[in-house]
Image: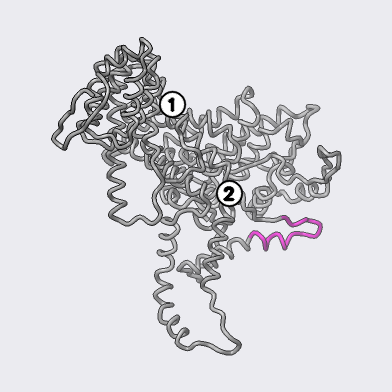
C-alpha cells in the first residue's frame, strides 16, 4: 500500500504502485499491480477522490499506453465519470483528449463510449414529477458533458469526423427500442451537426434511413387499423345498456345538461387530443416523434432568431435533396418520411420550383431507371395536388410540361410496332398520364373557376391522350380514371366513358403459376403499382406542423346559394353531398356504360380532414 490520499470530502484509499511503474512492470511480465489497478478502476462505487488521483497519473502515462494496454483502457472507458464531481469530469475529459492525441488507435473506442451516453434508460412509467425533473436534469448534464468532450476531441484530432459516422451508425438504437431512447439519441445527433457542420448531410441521411426503415414496417393500413381499433374501444366504453323500457331519468337529465357544453367543445377538444396523444402502434408513435424532431429541426435551421434565412435554407435544401435522391426516391410506398421535402418546399416558391425541376429531369432522362422515372411522376402529381403553397401559375406550367411530353411520346410511337398498351414498355408514359389525371382531379375547381379556365382545360387536348393507341385509361389506377372521367364529362373537357367501357369488356383475367405448381387467377387493378407520396398524413404530433400547408380533397361544391352550412356536422353533410355528385352522375350514364367506383383510400379523394 502506498499511503492514503486525503480530500476535502473525506478519505480514500488506493492500493498498488504508481501507474507508470505498474505499466512498466506489466511489460516485463509482472501482472500483479496491473490486475490490482484494473480491479480498483472496475469498482462501480469508486470514490471521486480516488478516481481523480488515478486519472491524474493515467494522463501522465498516455504516451506508453499502446495497444497492449487495451484491457486497461477498456476499463477506464466503462467508468461512469459523468456521475462524479465537476473536477473529476474535467480531469476525465482531459484524459480522453490526451489519450486519443497520443494513441489514435483508441479513437474509435472513445467515440463509441461517448455516443453510447446518448442511449439513456427508458422513462419509468410510475415516476412522480419530482423524480422526473431530477432525472431530466441529470440527463441534460450528461449530454452536455458528452458534447463538450466531442468538441474537444474534434479540435485536437482533425480525423475524428471520418471515424464518427461509422461509430454513430453502430450505436444507433434498433427501431423497436423505446421511443424515448430514440428521441434522445436523434436530438443529440442533431446537436452534433451544429458544431460539426460538415457531417450534417451524413447525420441527417443516417437518421432518415432509420426512419424509412420504420415507415415501411408500418404501412398506412396498419396505422389506420390500430387507430380505428382504439376509437372503437372508446366508443364501446361509452355505450349505456338499458333494460327493456327502463330509463334512468337522472342519467338522462345529466346527459342533457352536459350535451350543450360538449357540442361546443367537442371540435376543439377532439382535435387537441388527436394532436397530443401518442399513436397507438408503437412503431408509428416512434416515427411520429422522430418526424416532429426532423421538421422542427428544419424550421429552426431555416429560421434562426425567428427570421427566414435564405442562405441557410439553400444549404439545407441541397443536403435534403441529396438525401431524398439516395434514400427516399428509390423507396417504394413509404408513407410519411418524404414529407420533409414537402415541408421545406413550402418556405419559399423558389424551393418548390427547384424540387419540381429536379423531379422533371428524372422523368425526361431516358437513362434514368424506369422505376425512378415513375416515382418522380408520382411525386410531381402529389406535390402539385396537395401543397397549399403551389400557385396557380405553377400548376398550369406543370400540366403544360407533362401534356407536351405525353404528346411527343405519342407522336414517337405512331407507326411503331410497340404502339399498344403495355406497362413494361411504356411505364413512364403511363405514370405521367396518371399524374396529369390526378392533378386535374384535385385542382379542377381552381383551374376551371379561373379566368378562361375552361378554354385552358380544353386547350390541353386531353382527348388525344385518352384515345391514343397506348390507351392510358386502361393502365392507370381505376379510381383516378373514374374521377377524371366524371369531372371531364361534367365540364365537357373530354369524354372517357366509351374508352373505359371498351377496356372493361376487354379485361381478361391473368393466370399465374405459383411455386407449388398450382395456378391462380388474378386481376391486376393497379398494374402501375402506383402510390401517392403525399397522401393524407396520419401521424398526430408531427402532423400539426403540416396541416396548415396541406390541401385536402374538396370535391365539387353544391351550387345552392340558399343553403348555408355551418359547424362540423354540416361540413360532413356537405362532404357527402359533394361526393354524391360523382356517384349520382355514374347512375345516370347511358345503358351499356359500366359504372366504376369513385372512391379509393389510396388517392385520398374522400379524405375530408387532414390526418384521417
Magenta segment's dominant SS is loop
- Residue reaching furthest to the top: 28
- Rounded to the nearest whole Å, what is the CA distance between mark 1 and mark 2? 33 Å
- From the image, tell me which residue sits under label 2: 220
Q: Residue at 50%, 57% (x, y): give it.
A: 609
Tell me if residue 559 can be seen.
no
In percent of width and height, residue 43 lies at 33, 33
In percent of width and height, residue 62 lies at 29, 16
Mark 1 or mark 2: whose residue is earlier in sequence: 1
Q: Residue at 68%, 45% (x, y): give it.
A: 477
Considering only vertical position in the picture, is 237 above or below 161?
below
Q: Quadrant of residue 530?
A: top right
Q: Residues within 10 Å of mark 2 (few under 14, many from 20)?
A: many
Looking at the rendering, the stretch of residues picked out in magenta corresponds to: 582-596
In percent of width and height, residue 282 lies at 51, 49
* Nearer the observer, 294 or 380: 294
- From the image, tell me which residue sits under label 1: 167
* In the image: residue 146, left or right of residue 171: left
In percent of width and height, residue 351 lies at 43, 34
Amino acid at each position: 500500500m502506498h499511503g492514503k490520499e486525503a480530500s476535502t470530502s473525506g478519505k480514500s484509499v488506493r492500493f498498488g504502485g504508481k501507474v507508470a511503474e505498474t505499466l512498466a512492470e506489466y511489460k516485463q511480465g509482472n501482472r500483479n499491480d496491473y490486475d490490482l489497478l484494473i480491479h480498483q478502476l472496475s469498482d462501480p462505487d469508486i470514490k471521486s477522490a480516488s478516481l481523480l488521483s488515478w486519472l491524474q497519473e493515467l494522463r501522465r502515462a498516455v504516451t506508453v499506453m499502446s495497444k497492449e494496454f487495451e484491457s486497461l483502457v477498456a476499463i477506464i472507458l466503462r467508468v461512469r465519470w459523468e456521475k462524479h464531481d465537476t473536477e473529476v469530469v474535467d480531469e476525465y475529459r482531459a484524459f480522453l483528449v490526451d489519450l486519443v492525441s497520443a494513441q489514435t488507435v483508441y479513437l474509435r473506442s472513445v467515440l463509441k463510449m461517448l455516443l453510447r451516453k446518448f442511449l439513456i434508460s427508458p422513462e419509468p412509467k410510475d415516476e412522480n414529477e419530482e423524480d422526473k425533473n431530477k432525472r431530466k436534469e441529470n440527463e441534460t448534464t450528461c449530454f452536455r458533458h458528452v458534447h463538450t468532450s466531442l468538441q474537444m476531441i474534434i479540435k485536437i484530432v482533425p480525423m475524428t469526423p471520418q471515424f464518427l459516422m461509422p461509430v454513430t451508425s453502430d450505436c444507433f438504437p434498433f427501431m423497436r427500442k423505446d421511443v424515448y431512447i430514440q428521441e434522445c439519441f436523434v436530438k443529440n445527433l442533431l446537436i452534433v451537426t451544429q458544431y460539426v457542420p460538415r457531417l450534417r448531410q451524413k447525420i441527417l441521411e443516417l437518421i432518415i434511413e432509420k426512419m424509412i426503415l420504420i415507415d415501411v414496417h408500418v404501412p398506412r393500413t396498419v396505422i389506420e387499423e390500430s387507430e380505428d381499433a382504439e376509437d372503437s374501444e372508446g366508443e364501446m366504453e361509452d355505450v349505456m345498456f338499458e333494460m327493456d323500457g327502463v330509463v334512468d331519468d337522472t342519467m338522462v337529465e345529466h346527459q342533457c345538461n352536459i350535451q350543450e357544453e360538449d357540442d361546443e367543445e367537442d371540435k376543439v377538444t377532439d382535435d387537441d387530443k388527436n394532436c397530443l396523444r401518442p399513436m397507438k402502434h408503437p412503431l408509428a408513435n416512434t416515427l411520429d416523434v422522430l418526424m416532429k424532431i426532423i421538421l422542427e429541426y428544419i424550421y429552426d435551421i431555416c429560421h434562426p432568431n425567428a427570421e427566414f434565412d435564405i442562405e441557410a435554407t439553400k444549404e439545407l435544401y441541397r443536403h435534403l435533396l441529396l438525401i431524398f435522391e439516395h434514400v427516399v426516391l428509390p423507396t417504394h410506398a413509404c408513407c410519411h418520411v418524404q414529407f420533409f421535402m414537402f415541408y421545406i418546399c413550402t418556405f419559399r416558391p423558389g424551393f418548390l420550383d427547384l424540387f419540381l425541376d429536379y423531379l422533371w429531369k428524372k422523368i425526361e432522362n431516358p437513362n434514368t431507371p424506369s422505376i425512378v422515372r415513375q416515382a418522380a411522376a408520382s411525386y410531381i402529381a402529389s406535390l402539385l395536388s396537395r401543397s397549399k403553397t403551389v400557385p396557380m401559375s405553377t400548376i398550369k406550367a406543370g400540366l403544360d410540361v407533362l401534356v407536351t411530353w405525353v404528346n411527343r411520346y405519342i407522336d414517337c410511337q405512331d407507326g411503331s410496332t410497340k404502339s399498344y398498351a403495355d406497362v413494361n414498355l411504356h411505364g413512364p408514359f403511363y405514370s405521367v398520364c396518371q399524374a396529369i389525371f390526378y392533378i386535374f382531379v384535385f385542382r379542377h375547381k381552381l383551374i376551371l373557376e379561373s379566368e378562361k379556365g375552361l378554354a385552358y382545360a380544353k386547350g390541353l387536348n386531353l382527348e388525344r391522350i385518352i384515345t391514343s393507341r397506348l390507351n392510358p385509361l386502361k393502365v392507370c389506377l381505376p379510381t383516378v380514371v373514374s374521377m377524371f372521367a366524371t369531372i371531364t364529362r361534367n365540364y365537357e373537357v373530354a369524354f372517357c366513358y366509351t374508352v373505359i367501357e371498351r377496356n372493361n369488356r376487354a379485361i381478361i383475367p391473368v393466370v399465374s403459376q405459383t411455386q407449388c405448381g398450382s395456378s391462380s387467377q388474378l386481376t391486376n387493378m393497379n398494374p402501375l403499382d402506383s402510390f401517392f407520396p403525399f397522401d393524407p398524413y396520419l401521424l398526430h404530433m408531427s402532423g400539426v406542423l403540416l396541416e396548415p400547408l396541406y390541401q385536402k380533397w374538396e370535391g365539387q361544391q353544391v351550387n345552392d346559394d340558399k343553403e348555408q352550412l355551418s359547424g362540423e356536422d354540416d361540413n360532413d353533410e356537405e362532404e357527402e353531398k359533394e361526393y354524391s355528385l360523382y356517384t349520382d352522375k355514374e347512375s345516370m350514364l347511358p345503358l351499356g356504360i359500366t359504372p366504376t367506383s369513385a372512391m379509393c383510400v389510396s388517392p385520398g379523394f374522400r379524405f375530408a380532414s387532414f390526418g384521417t
